[in-house]
Image (tube, helix red, strand yellow):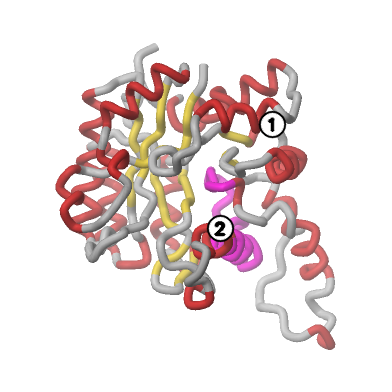
Amino acid sequence: MIVDSHVHLFPQQWRPRGQMPPDLFDVQQQLERMESAGLATSIVSDPHIWYGDLDTGDIEQVRTYNDFVADLARQHPGALAGLATAIPWRGREHLGEARRAVEELGLAGLALPTSDQNRYLDSVPAEFWDYVSSVGAPVFVHPGGQTVGQDLMGIYRMGEVCGRPLDMTVTLARFILTGTYERFPQLQLLCAHAGGAITAIADRLDFGHELRNYTPLGPWGDVELVEPPSSHVKKLFLDTVTFGSRTLKMALETVGSEHICFGTDCPPVPWTVERHLAVVDELDLSDDRRADVLGRNAERLFLAGEAGPRGGVRDA
């Protein structure tokens, strides 16, 4: 069983507002792609990126999106599961919408951007994380459209190839170093693009924390973690959207095969499922570990609650 944990689709009413890849609006094409490639389920989310003038973080647009993915899950049980979008920095109404999406719409989890208006995950109100922890909703973290250093990346789509992985790295590092992850240890975070460079800097985070009281290197912060930062990196779930096996190998060595989830980022990225599978196959995993990566981990993370209040989205 193969589960694609990283798929984006948009409601048709967003189409006139910007110039975007047309397959983002083509549900039937996605279903045909899944059948051709042997995908059992796609986990659909909002990438929090817009190519036009519509603010998709506006609460009304957030509700529009959540209704859209809930309808997809109802119309295509077993094939499509939906994640609720929320922009929790923008007020308590986003917490209320997260409650509605999880408890009333039955969506399989939440999808949050790495940042919003220069605010990162560590600055999300504690009551939001309290709620997410209390209901056990998994969270897919995905880079948004405006990322760290965006003004320096106007050529060669550097915002895409550099800025977005960097934004992921910054938000995860802040989430760990500020103690937010320690305060909410039940959180299950699946990080797009294998978490950016978070696995590459895990040892460096430990180095910084070890020397936090060494003032010649400059100021640290007020938080002293109970466990070293790398121990929190190891708790993350990471997807396979790395476009090469070297990065994926580092992710696998850091968090283990039980914390890696297959994904394609298609739509909108025009890489075939077969190419993404080939990246996984280059690691020469055992059959059991490969099964974890390709489907079992995502199934446990997003689909195990299908008979309960969340995510009644697939057949047995």
Q: Closer to the camera, 29 or 105?
A: 29
Q: Residue at x 43, y 57 (%)?
A: 113
- Quarter of the image where one finds residue 304: top left
- Asked if residue 295 lies left or right of residue 81, the reply is right
Which mark sits nearer the N-terminus, 2 or 1?
A: 2
Q: Which mark is residue 294?
A: none
* Circle 1: residue type: Ser
Q: Which residues are magenta?
A: 166-193
Locate residue 19, reporting x and y percent. 26, 55
**Mark 2 touching mark 1, by CB under 8 A?**
no
Mostly what secondary structure, the magenta segment? helix
- Inspect this view and state whether residue 180 appears: no
Q: Which mark is residue 161?
A: 2
Q: Residue at x 21, y 43 (%)?
A: 11
- Inspect this view and state whether residue 232 appears: yes
Q: Which residue is mark 1?
A: 257
- Asked if residue 11 lies left or right of residue 170, the reply is left
